[in-house]
Image: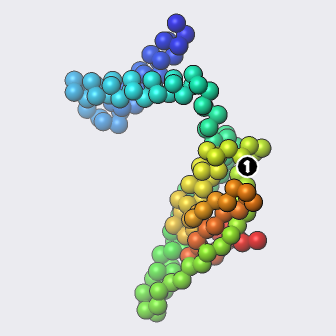
């Protein structure tokens, strides 16, 4: 009974989110939203029943996610400045590959946490993660311009 109640509450929340995003309350949209919400909640319950929710990133990673908007703004300005300079000088900018320390916060080294951290580090336009090397806790990154927010190779 408890599982059914959790399923129904989750289904209702997802249906409301669907209707809020669609912005149209019509029978077709309600039916499509109901089916999509049912599929999503069923998958979510399947994951929960098998104990696979441990694959979620650690909550401590959220503090890194809070810096992403500022990183995007600063690094976008840096990239635009470099591209403008390259256009004036008529020479293409040159980035570089580097190997940096890549240890997610927290005690766990789950693959979900590492993947989420790599994704966060790749959002901003100046630097992105190419490969994470699990055995030695390092990552290969590409950097267009080294600045104060760029992680330095060690």
Residue at 43%, 92% in the rendered image: 90
Which quadrant of the structure image shows residue 35? top left
In this picture, residue 74 sits left or right of residue 133: left
Q: Is residue 55 above or below residue 78?
A: above
Whether residue 66 is visible here, answered yes or no, is no
- The residue lying toward the viewer, choosing from 20 and 134, is 134
Residue 94 is situated, as x and y percent measured from the top left of the image, at 54, 83
Tell me which colouring the rendered structure shows. rainbow
Q: What SS does tag 1 mark?
A: loop
Residue 62 is situated, as x and y percent measured from the top left of the image, at 64, 45
Which quadrant of the structure image shows residue 126? bottom right
In this picture, residue 92 sits left or right of residue 22: right
Which quadrant of the structure image shows residue 97? bottom right
Q: Residue furthest bottom?
A: 89
Residue at 22%, 27% in the rendered image: 28
Whether residue 94 is visible here, answered yes or no, is yes
Q: Residue furthest left?
A: 27
Residue at 39%, 27% in the rendered image: 39
Q: Which residue in the protein does label 1 denote? A: 105
Residue 46 is situated, as x and y percent measured from the top left of the image, at 51, 24
Q: Is residue 129 above or below residue 54?
A: below
For the C terminus, the image quarter is bottom right
Residue at 77%, 44% in the rendered image: 107
Residue 96 is situated, as x and y percent measured from the top left of the image, at 60, 78
């Amino acid at each position: 009974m408890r599982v059914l109640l959790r399923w129904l509450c989750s289904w209702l929340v997802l249906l409301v989110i669907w209707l809020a995003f669609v912005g149209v309350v019509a029978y077709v949209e309600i039916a499509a939203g109901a089916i999509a919400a049912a599929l999503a909640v069923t998958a979510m319950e399947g994951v929960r029943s098998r104990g696979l929710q441990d694959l979620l990133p650690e909550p401590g990673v959220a503090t890194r996610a809070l810096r992403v908007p500022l990183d995007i703004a600063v690094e976008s300005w840096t990239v635009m400045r470099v591209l403008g300079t390259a256009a004036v000088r008529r020479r293409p900018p040159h980035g570089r590959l580097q190997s940096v320390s890549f240890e997610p916060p927290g005690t766990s080294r789950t693959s979900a946490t590492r993947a989420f951290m790599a994704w966060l580090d790749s959002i901003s336009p100046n630097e992105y993660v190419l490969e994470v090397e699990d055995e030695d806790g390092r990552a290969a990154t590409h950097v267009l311009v080294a600045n104060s927010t760029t992680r330095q190779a060690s």
